Amino acid sequence: MRVFISSIQNELIKLLIGKRTWITLIIILGISIITAVGLFKENRDNQDWKADVESKLQSTEMELKNMEEMPYKYKKILNDEIELYRYYLEKNISPYEANVWKLINKSSGVMMILTIIIIIASSDSLAREFSKGTIKILLIRPINRWEILLSKFTALTLYSWMLIISWFILTLIIGSALFGGLGDFNIPHINSADGEIVMNSTGKLLLLKIIFQSIQILVFAAISFTISTLLRNNSIATAISLFLFLGSSIFYNLFQGKEWAKYILFSHLNLNEFINSKVNSVGFTLTESLLMISIYLVTILSVTVVIFSKKDIKV
Amino acid sequence: MMSESILEIKDVSKAISKKQIIHNVSLEVKPGEVVGLLGPNGAGKTTILKMIVGFYSVGEGEIYIDGINIASNKEKCLEKIGAIIESPDLYDNMTGLGNLKFCARFYSHVNSSRIQEAVELVGLTKSINQKVKTYSLGMKQRLGIAQAILHEPKLLILDEPTNGLDPEGIYELRNYIHTLTRKGISVLISSHLLSEMQIICDRVAIIQEGKLIDIIKVTTISDLDLSINKVTYQLWDKDSAEKAKKILREHNMKIHINDRDKLITIEINHLSEILKLNNLFHKVKIQFIQVSIQKENLEEKFMDIVKNKAGIQ
C-alpha cells in the first residue's frame, strides 16, 4: 500500500509540473474573468430590468405571431421564452441579478474544456512513458503492474478534481471581489421547459452540475487511458476519446428508441437530466445510471490492467 | 536462507512472435562478482536482461534472484535489482534530484542522506539541481547509475553502459563498478565490446544467436595482445571535423578520414594519448559525439578461441 501511495504521489508530481497545468489554469482564469466582467456589466446596465423584460416579451410575442409557419421546434423555444419573461414580471424577479454563485454557474462551461484537457492527459499518461522510454524506470521498481496503472488513473482523477477545485476557487475569488461578497447561495435559477417553469437554487444546481460533470470526466479519462494503454499511442487515443466525447449525444440520438440502447454507456453520461427529473430519457433512475457507469468503468479498467500485466514490454 | 548465487538463470528459453530468441541459457552470478554478457548486436543479450528485470516473461526455465523465483514473486526480486536497460531513461523536465527522489519513493529505506550518498558517488553534486534536459549524455549515464544503486541493490544490471561515453566517462564507470563490487554488489553487464569486458568483468559469458557459447574467466582474455593502436572520433558536425583534420595534421598524427560519417581514426601507441587528444579537442572547441578504441584483430582472435572451445568451425 505504501508503494502504491508513493506511486500516486509520483504521478501527481509528473502531472503538476507539466506546462499543461499552467496553461489550463491561465485558460480557467481567463474564462472566469471574462464571464465575471460580462455578468457584472449586464447587471449594472439593466437596473431598469422590468422595462427590458417587457420589451423582450413584446418582441418575442410579435415574432411568434408574425411567423406562423415556423417549425414547431422554434415555436416551442419562443413559447418557453415568453413563459419565462411573464414569470419574471409576475414574481418580480430580476433575471440580471448577479452574485458569485450565478457567476460560477455561468462559467461552468469550463468543465467541458477540463474534460478535453483530462482526455489529453489520460492519453499521454502511459503512452508518453513508452515513447520516451521512461516506462522502464517504473517497471524496474518493486511495484505490481496493476499498481502502476491504478496509481496513474488515481492520479488523473485527483488531478481533474484539483483543476475543478482551482476553477471553483479562482471564480469564487474573482466574483467575491467584483460583487462584494459571496451573496445568496440559493439565488434562483429559472428555466422554462415544455411550458413549465422550473426554479432551482443556483448554488445547489451548480454543485450537482460539478458532481455530474466530474463523473463524466472520470469516464472519458478511463476510455482515453484504456485506449492509450492498449495501443500505446497517445494521438490515436486522444482522437478517439475526443470523437466519443464530442459525439456522445449524436451516438445516443442515433440509437435512441432501440431497446438495447438504454444499456449503452452514452445513454447515461448526461447526468444533468436528473437535475429536473427523477428518471433520465431511457427511464433509469440516478442510482441505476450510476450503477451502469460503474459497471462500464470497472470493466474498462479491468481489461486494461489484465492486458498490461500480461504483455511483454517492448521498449 | 542465504543463497550462494545472487542471480541464477536455469535453462532459460524465450520465443518472441513465434521466433526463438533465447535457447537454454544457464548462468550464475556470485556475490561481488562482475559478469559480462558478450555478443554481437542482436545476439539476445538484452532479451536475457529484460527477462531478469521482468519486462519479458520467462518463456521456459527459471530465473532466481537471491534464491527467489522471479515468476513467483517479481516485486520481491525487483527490490534486489538495480538496472539500466539500453539507455538511462530519465524525466527530462525534472531536476536530477527530482528524478532520484521519484525513484526513492518506491523504497522505504531510501532517505535523503542515501540520495546524497549516491549523488556524491557518481560525482553529480554540482549539477543535481539542474533540469535533466540540460545534462550531457555522460551526466545522464551517471544519474542513471545513481538511480540504479539508490536502494543498494544486490544485483546491478547494466546494458551497454559505455554507449555514448567518452574515455574519461568509461574510466569513471569502471571505478564506480569496482567501488560497488567492493561493497558486495554483483554486476551483470552486457556489451558487444570485448575490450570493455576485459577491463571490467571477472567472467564473460559469450552469447551468439541466443545461445550461451561459453563462459570464460577474464584472465584467459588477458593473455591476448591488447595493445591499443587506433582511436576513432565521431565529430559533432562538419565544422568540427574540418578543425580536427587541420589540427591533427599540424601535430603530425597519422589519421584516416571518413568525411561522410564525420569519423576520424587516429593511430596511437598508448591509452594516455586519448586523454591528450581529448584535451586538445576541448581546447580548440572541437565537439565530438563518440570515441571508440580499436584493438587490432582482437575480436577475431577472441572469437577464434571461443569457436575452438565450442568446437565450431
Image: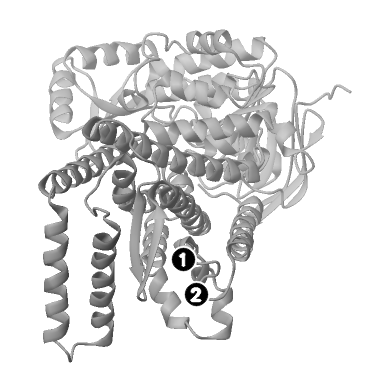
Amino acid beneath label 2: Ser
Q: Position of residue A277 (x, y in %)?
A: 50, 67
CA gap between label 2 and label 1 equals: 8 Å
Q: Nearer the viewer, residue A124 or B247?
A: A124
Residue B256: percent from left, percent from top: 24, 31
Where B108 falls versus B241 (above or below)?
above
Residue B192, percent across and down? 51, 36
Q: Could you say whether the residue bearing mark 2 is in a helix, strand or loop?
A: loop
Rendered-image quadrant of the N terminus of chain A:
top right
Look at the picture and state if B261 lies above or below A50. above
Determine whether label 2 and label 1 are within 8 Å by CB: yes
Please indicate whether residue B220 sits to the left or right of residue A219 in the image.
right
Q: Looking at the image, which residue is at 57% across and 85% down?
A: A259
Residue A315 in percent (x, y) is at 50, 46
Q: Mark 2 packing: few (<14 Cα in 10 Å), some, or many (20+)? A: some
Q: Earlier in the sequence, mark 2 or mark 1?
A: 1
- The residue depicted at 55 percent of the width and 11 percent of the height is B112
Question: Disc 1 designates what residue?
Answer: A273
Left or right: where does residue A152 sit relative to residue A107? right
Given residues A11 and B127, the one toward you in this image is: A11
**At 51% from the left edge and 9% from the top edge, which residue is drawn?**
B116
Q: How is the image coloured?
A: one colour
The residue where tag 2 is placed is A281
**Residue B111 in the figure: left or right of residue A28:** right
Toward the bottom, the furthest residue is: A69
Which chain hosts label 2? A
Is B244 in front, or is A159?
A: A159
Q: Is residue A260 visible?
A: yes
